[in-house]
Amino acid sequence: RKEVEQDPGPFNVPEGATVAFNCTYSNSASQSFFWYRQDCRKEPKLLMSVYSSGNEDGRFTAQLNRASQYISLLIRDSKLSDSATYLCVVWVGTASKLTFGTGTRLQVTL
Amino acid sequence: GAVVSQHPSRVICKSGTSVKIECRSLDFQATTMFWYRQFPKQSLMLMATSNEGSKATYEQGVEKDKFLINHASLTLSTLTVTSAHPEDSSFYICSASASGGVGASTDTQYFGPGTRLTVL
């Protein structure tokens, strides 16, 4: 079983749509959680951290459920520029490393 | 935010040659640098963690004699792929952390732009 699992997609949505991505992680010792964005052939860039209380940054809302080991990302009012691969990333403190999911590809169309 | 550079951005080489990739933190001192590899349609996989002045810690399955890592200063780490073969063709990405990351789970890792290696 992969340490971090995501639906690979692609998710094809029209501009203005709301889209949700899910992620599950297997290591219960995971301490911190993030969503990164990766454009084609580029490095990943931090989109937002994910907190247990849930957090929002503009059109982006992230949720964490530690009991279910589940993380989500909601994007409202999708823009063409949101087209990218979204990576669910977990920090395991005991291993001192980030573990990346394979990513979910989003394509926003006109 | 902090800037991390990598050089070269792209390299094409013949099988059997060695390739050196540099990772530099431009405006901060990086106690810890991480080297990742990403194959097409796959996730980033951590190869090794290097701390300035000490030997790198390699992930399981990564050959330390093939992937030589040197972290000689707080702003520079290098990855040398020795005797590269076509199966080593990949996207190599480094990241740097100012605080080491050990026990500080919210340390930010700043990623370099990556190096695309193609071995013919």
Image (tube, coloured by chain):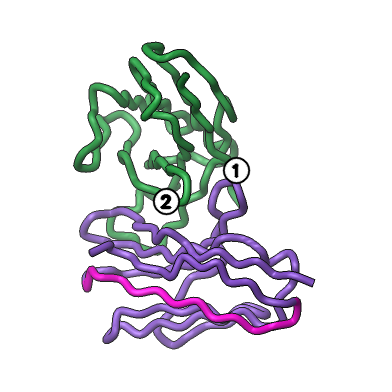
Q: Position of residue B56 (x, y in %)?
A: 27, 33
Name the amino acid type tagged 1.
Val
Boundaries of the magenta span: A15-28
Which chain does the residue under circle 2 lie in?
A: B
Badge 1 local density, few (<14 within 10 Å), some, or many (20+)? some
Residue displayed at 55% across by 47% down: A43
The stretch drawn in magenta includes residue A21: yes
Q: Position of residue B25 (x, y in %)?
A: 53, 37
Residue displayed at 36% across by 64% down: A90
Q: Quadrant of the C terminus of chain A?
A: bottom right
**What chain is the purple one?**
A
Name the amino acid type tagged 2.
Gln
Q: Quadrant of the N terminus of chain A?
A: bottom left
**What chain is the green one?**
B
Q: Is residue A70 above or below residue A104?
A: below
Tags 2 and 1 both on a single chain: yes
- Dot 1 falls on a residue whose secondary structure is loop
- Dot 2 falls on a residue whose secondary structure is loop
Residue displayed at 51% across by 80% down: A62
Which chain does the residue under circle 1 lie in?
A: B
Quickly name the residue at label 2.
B42
Query: Quadrant of the rendered structure where residue B87 is?
Result: top left
Q: Position of residue A37 (x, y in %)?
A: 56, 60
Q: Nearer the viewer, mark 2 or mark 1?
A: 2
The stretch drawn in magenta includes residue A91: no
Front residue of A37/B23: it is A37
Quickly name the residue at label 1.
B3
